[in-house]
Every structure is written in structure tokens, then in C-alpha cells.
């Protein structure tokens, strides 16, 4: 399990290209063409939400997502730097009973079985111990961890420290060195 010194890393929108998978699904099944810049709100306000949630709850959706550019190399590097004290911390989608299994299978494919088994699949991230959490949710708050926002079009208003992609690890290292948030 993680501890108060751990680095936590979200999956959807951070290492897995959830939006890209959703765009493909919605275009194929509903004929709407969406792009990353259309997602200006984390909760999909002003978009065909029922189609989007049908995509996000479809069987196999999380298993088949593409990996975000640079994520595998960068995350493995961070695992080395922090002596393995790095955990995936991901919230499962309500209404998709295969979600957790799909996420662990995906992690096994792109990383390894250890990382997949130890991933924290949690409905409430505020109960998870960690020093820093890398997140795309601009409203993440309430844990002992300090958020670092993984830049996406829908989180630009967030005031937390921001990384602009997986080439941008300095902000993570700085946050890991900062005084704990407690
Ligand atoms: Mg996310």
C-alpha cells in the first residue's frame, strides 16, 4: 500500500488516453466528431453526455485505451527514482463491472504485473496516502497529498502546479521535495 511519502498517479487522462478512446467510440457509434479542444469541462457540460457515458461504460473500453505519449518511460523512471514508492491511483467507472479488471490488465500490458497488482483502484482518493498525486481532475482536493495537474484542455483554470506532458518531470520532483501538506 501507499504511504505518506508515495507518488500517486491517476490513469484516465494522465497515462491512458481516455478522451481519445471516447472520441473514437462516440464517432463510430453515434456519429459525433469531437476533439480534445471540445472538452472544456471535466464533467462534459454542453456535450452529448449520454453518448459519452455510454462510451465510458462500454465493456472493454478501459482495456483498449492508448497510452499517452511518453507515459511508460517517464513513469518507469519515476518508479526508479522513488525506489518503487509510486502507485497508480484510479477511480473506477460506476456502472461498468469489468472496469477494475480492465485497468489492471492494461497496466500489466504497458508496465508489469507488480505495478498492476499494487495499483490502488479507489472510489475515494482522499482516503489514499501519498505526498503528491498527478491528476487531470482540476477539482481534486481533500487528501493529504499535493496535486500536480497533468495539462488537458479541460483543466486549464486549475491553480495547482502543472506538468505539460510526460517530458515535464521537474514539477513532479519539486512537488515531491516540497513540505508535506499536513
Ligand atoms: Mg483522470
Image (tube, rainbow, N blue to C red):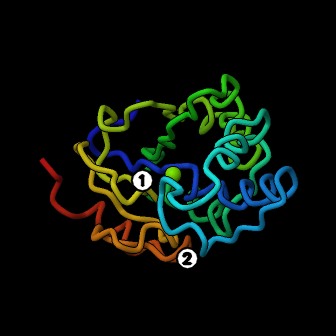
Q: Quadrant of the N terminus?
A: top left
What residue did someone put label 1 on? 82
Residue 51 shown left or right of residue 78 in the figure: right
Alpha-carbon neighbours of circle 2 within 10 Å: few (<14), some, or many (≥20)?
A: few
The disc placed on residue 105 is none
Residue sitting at 79 percent across and 46 percent down?
Answer: 64
Residue that appears at 39% across and 50% down = 7
- Residue 170 against residue 48 in the figure, above or below: below
Of 125 and 145, the residue lying toward us: 125
* Front residue (pair 46, 8): 46
Eye-nearest disc, 2 or 1? 2
Q: Secondary structure at mark 2?
A: loop
127 up-or-down from 30: above or below: above
Q: Image quadrant of residue 55?
A: top right
Report which residue position mark 2 lands on. Answer: 167
Q: Could you say where residue 111 lies in the image, as x and y percent from the top left?
A: 68, 47
Q: Residue 178: x, y in percent?
A: 20, 64
Q: Residue at x 38, y 66 (%)?
A: 172
Does residue 95 lie above or below 173 as drawn? above
C-alpha span from label 2 to label 1:
17 Å
Amino acid at each position: 500500500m501507499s504511504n505518506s511519502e508515495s507518488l500517486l498517479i491517476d490513469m484516465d487522462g494522465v497515462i491512458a488516453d481516455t478522451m481519445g478512446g471516447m472520441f473514437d467510440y462516440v464517432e463510430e457509434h453515434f456519429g459525433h466528431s469531437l476533439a480534445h479542444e471540445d472538452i472544456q469541462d471535466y464533467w462534459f457540460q454542453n456535450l452529448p453526455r449520454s453518448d459519452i457515458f455510454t462510451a465510458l461504460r462500454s465493456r472493454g473500453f478501459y482495456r483498449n485505451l492508448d497510452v499517452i505519449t511518453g507515459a511508460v518511460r517517464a513513469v518507469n523512471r519515476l518508479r526508479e527514482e522513488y525506489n518503487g514508492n509510486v502507485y497508480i491511483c484510479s477511480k473506477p467507472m460506476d456502472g461498468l463491472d469489468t472496469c477494475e479488471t480492465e485497468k489492471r490488465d492494461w497496466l500489466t500490458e504497458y508496465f508489469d504485473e507488480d505495478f498492476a497488482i499494487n495499483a490502488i483502484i479507489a472510489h475515494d482518493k482522499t482516503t489514499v496516502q501519498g505526498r503528491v498525486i498527478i491528476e487531470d481532475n482540476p477539482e481534486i482536493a481533500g487528501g493529504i497529498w499535493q496535486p500536480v495537474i497533468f495539462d488537458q484542455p479541460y483543466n486549464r483554470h486549475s491553480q495547482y502546479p502543472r506538468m505539460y506532458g510526460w517530458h515535464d518531470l521537474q514539477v513532479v520532483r519539486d512537488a515531491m521535495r516540497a513540505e508535506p501538506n499536513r
